[in-house]
Image (tube, grey):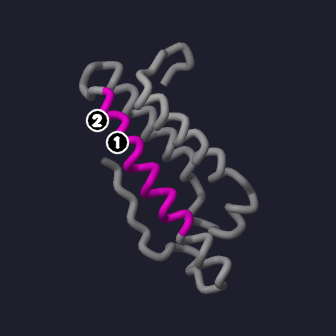
Amino acid sequence: MTPATVYPPALRREIRRAARLSSVLTVRAINAQVSDWCCGRADEVRAVVGDATREWSEGRLDEARAADRIGSYVRGVEEALQAWVRAARGGSASRTRPPNDTIVDG
């Protein structure tokens, strides 16, 4: 993903959403609550975005499929993060695996 690239609207929307999630994953307060699960997730999000945008720029994915790949992945991480935070607030979270840790890399 290069800053000079102009992405189509649907893809741009999912890239921005992934960037926001990546920022949230690096917040120390979040990391303190979810421990090991957060470690490396921001890099993982950036890698998924990079792979999808590269495949789009190479013509291997159309806009809709690239946006869906990023969006599906981001939704999975967001759901897992929310479950971790809820569990941490209740004091019942495992420190190594969140409840329903299902991440889909479409």
Q: In which quarter of the image is residue 34?
A: bottom right
Q: Which x, y percent locates residue 27?
A: 72, 53
Tell me the crowding category of disc 2: few under 14, some 14 to 19, or many 20 or more residues within 10 angstroms, Cα based.
Answer: some
Q: What residue type is labelled 1?
A: Arg
Spatial CA distance of label 2 from label 1 is: 6 Å
The residue at the point 67 percent across, 51 percent down is 26
| Tags 2 and 1 touching, CB below 8 Å | yes
Magenta stretch bounds: 63-82
What type of secondary structure mainly makes up the magenta span? helix
Instruction: Give how far across and how far down residue 19 sits, in percent.
Output: 58, 39
Q: Name the residue under label 2.
A: 65
x and y, in percent, of residue 64 in the image? 30, 33
Which residue is at the far top?
A: 4
Q: Name the residue under label 1.
A: 69
Secondary structure state at the residue bearing disc 2: helix
Could you tell me which secondary element the residue under label 1 belongs to?
Answer: helix
Kindly identify the residue that appears in the image at 75 percent across and 62 percent down: 29
- Residue 8: assigned label: none
* Label 1, residues with CA under 10 Å away: few <14, some 14-19, many ≥20: many
